[in-house]
């Protein structure tokens, strides 16, 4: 049981390049999330998904797209990277948005856009 | 909307000192409350939680009590260790089930020997 895994762990992009971050979970969780973490800003929700084939916008969705074609995977795409997207990205999953469901986090992807 | 406010860091303590990290919240109804911990280079992991007023969550020597009257969920530990050095996040879950977790900005704790 690997929990939540993220690929890649590190990436450096040039402005304007595109990339996709992959999140995978093996816990049969319905809900998945993408966050970014910046110094002094805590965690900010980018997009989330309440089930296979669904996505919803979070607090800071601009410049990102997501897809949830399979229940176990949640992809985060950057179509045209900008330096403001330099951050650490975390994926998380849980059984659902309910009273006490714990979120499980991946180890993070550190992205630098130059 | 729902929000969480936690004390600004960083907090630096000597080993065996008493720790308090303040957390207050704004929410409609009666949310569930959580503390997550992030060790260096890792993702967040759940430390403890409380789902109703006056509940006390506890784990690894840490405690927090859900205080509805003061809308607070302060994290405490009687004697910190160097291994407790991490970033601590307070979070709430709306009981309506319509919104994801809302996190505070995090408090960095450094414990020195």
Image (cartoon, coloured by chain):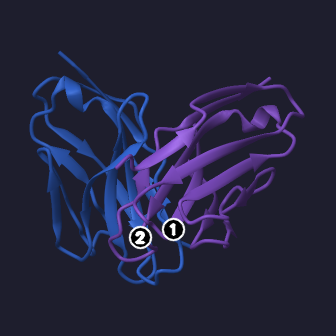
Circle nearer the N terminus (1, 2): 1
Q: Residue B32: x, y in percent? A: 33, 71
Q: CA distance from mark 1 to mark 2?
A: 6 Å
Q: Quadrant of residue A45?
A: bottom right
Residue positioned 29% across, 69% down in the render: B70
Looking at the image, residue A111 sits to the left or right of residue B76; the answer is right
Read off the residue under disc 1: A31
Read off the residue under disc 2: A95
Q: Residue B67: x, y in percent? A: 24, 69
Looking at the image, residue A77 sits to the left or right of residue A22; the answer is right
Q: Tag 1, which chain?
A: A
The colour of chain A is purple
Give the SS element for disc 1. Answer: strand
Pick the front one: B9 or B103:
B103
Pick the front one: A54 or B30:
A54
Q: Quadrant of the C terminus of chain A?
A: top right
Q: Give the label on residue B4, or none.
A: none
Q: Is residue B13 above or below residue A24?
A: above
Say if residue B5 shows up in the picture: yes
Q: Look at the numbered discs 1 and 2 and tell me whether their residues touch, using CB distance below 8 Å.
A: yes
């Amino acid at each position: 049981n690997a929990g939540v895994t993220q690929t890649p762990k590190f990436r450096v992009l040039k402005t304007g390049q595109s990339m996709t971050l992959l999140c995978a979970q093996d816990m049969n969780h319905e809900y998945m999330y993408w966050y970014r973490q910046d110094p002094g800003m805590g965690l900010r929700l980018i997009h989330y998904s309440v089930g296979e084939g669904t996505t919803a916008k979070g607090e800071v969705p601009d410049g990102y797209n997501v897809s949830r074609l399979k229940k176990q995977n949640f992809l985060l795409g950057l179509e045209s990277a900008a330096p403001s997207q330099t951050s650490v990205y975390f994926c998380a999953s849980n059984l659902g948005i309910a009273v006490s469901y714990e979120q499980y986090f991946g180890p993070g992807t550190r992205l630098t856009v130059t | 909307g729902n929000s969480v406010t936690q004390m600004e860091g960083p907090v630096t303590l000597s080993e065996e000192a008493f720790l308090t990290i303040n957390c207050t919240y704004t929410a409609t109804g009666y949310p569930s409350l959580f503390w997550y911990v992030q060790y260096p280079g890792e993702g967040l992991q759940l430390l403890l939680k409380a789902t109703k007023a006056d509940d006390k969550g506890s784990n690894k020597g840490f405690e927090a009590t859900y205080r509805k009257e003061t809308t607070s969920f302060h994290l405490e530990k009687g004697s910190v260790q160097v291994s407790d050095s991490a970033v601590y996040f307070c979070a709430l879950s709306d009981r309506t089930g319509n919104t994801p977790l809302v996190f505070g900005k995090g408090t960095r704790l450094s414990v020195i020997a």
